[in-house]
Image (cartoon, helix red, strand yellow):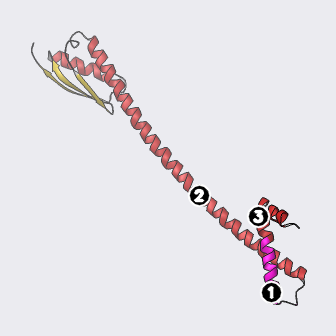
């Protein structure tokens, strides 16, 4: 067999090439040991069996490594998903809070008693805080009622201060 063809076969079929090279090395080693009582065929069979055993062990080690890599990838994916989910939940809560704040401000502006008053609306996790002046106690209470009626509001902390005009 030509050296180029032999090299081409070994590189084209790395597993078979490795087995073939290993078999030849083992055969040469056995021949060098001076085992005269075994035939060449027996020596070759023994070398092939040992090569297959080594290949089998290498395969088992490779499969174990692949399983460890799969488990690590799964854990990494789960961690990333959990982190992404937490981030998405936090973003959703901020958006919800912004929508609640805008809705309350719009409703307050529609009310004639409260539209002329500058009321600061702050929302965090569905808890609304109202700050600023109120013209009357009734206007202050009305602001609480309006804020509490908006979807997503968990509670209202009314810190409006009643100031006479």
Front residue of 106 and 151: 106
Lower position in the chain sequence, tag 3 or tag 1: 3
* Crowding near the residue tagged with mark 1, few <14, some 14–19, many ≥20 C-alpha atoms within 10 Å: few
Q: Which residue is mark 3?
A: 15
Could you say whether the residue bearing mark 2 is in a helix, strand or loop?
helix
Q: Tell whether 156 sits left or right of 25.
A: left
| Classed neighbour count for the residue bearing mark 2: other residues with Cα under 10 Å, few (<14), some (14–19), many (≥20) | few
Residue 87, visible in the rendered structure: yes
Q: Is residue 47 left or right of residue 64?
A: right
What residue is shown at x 81% (from left), y 70% (from top)?
Answer: 20
Q: In the figure, residue 156 lies in which quadrant? A: top left
| Real-space CA distance between mark 3 and mark 1, rounded to the nearest whole angstrom | 26 Å
- Image: magenta residue range: 21-37
Whichever of labels 2 and 3 marks the residue nearer the N terminus, that label is 3
Instruction: Pick the quarter of the image with the C terminus.
Output: top left
Q: Are marks 2 and 3 in contact (CB under 8 Å)?
A: no
Between label 2 and label 1, give the one nearer the viewer: 1
Give 133 or 68, whichever is nearer the viewer: 68
Disc 2: which residue:
69
Where in the figure is residue 5, as x and y percent of width and height?
84, 63
Query: Where does label 1 land, which residue?
Result: 32
SS class, disc 1: helix
Q: Is residue 21 above or below residue 118?
A: below
Label 2 and label 3: CA atoms lie apart by 22 Å
| Position of residue 105 in the picture relative to residue 38 (left or right) | left
Q: Can you tell which quarter of the image residue 119 is in?
A: top left
Comparing 4 with 117, the one in front is 4
């Amino acid at each position: 067999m030509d050296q180029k063809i032999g090299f081409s076969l070994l590189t084209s079929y790395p597993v078979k090439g490795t087995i073939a090279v290993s078999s030849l090395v083992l055969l040469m080693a056995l021949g060098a040991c001076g085992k005269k009582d075994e035939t060449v065929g027996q020596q070759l069979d023994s070398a092939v069996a040992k090569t297959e055993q080594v290949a089998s062990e290498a395969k088992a080690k490779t499969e174990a490594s692949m399983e460890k890599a799969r488990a690590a990838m799964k854990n990494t994916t789960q961690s990333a998903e959990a982190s992404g989910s937490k981030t998405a939940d936090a973003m959703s809560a901020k958006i919800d809070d912004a929508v609640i704040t805008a809705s309350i401000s719009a409703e307050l502006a529609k009310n004639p008693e409260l539209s002329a008053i500058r009321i600061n609306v702050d929302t965090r996790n569905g808890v609304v805080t109202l700050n600023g002046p109120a013209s009357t106690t009734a206007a202050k209470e009305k602001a609480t009622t309006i804020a509490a009626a908006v979807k997503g509001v968990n509670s209202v902390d009314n810190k409006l201060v009643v100031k006479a005009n």
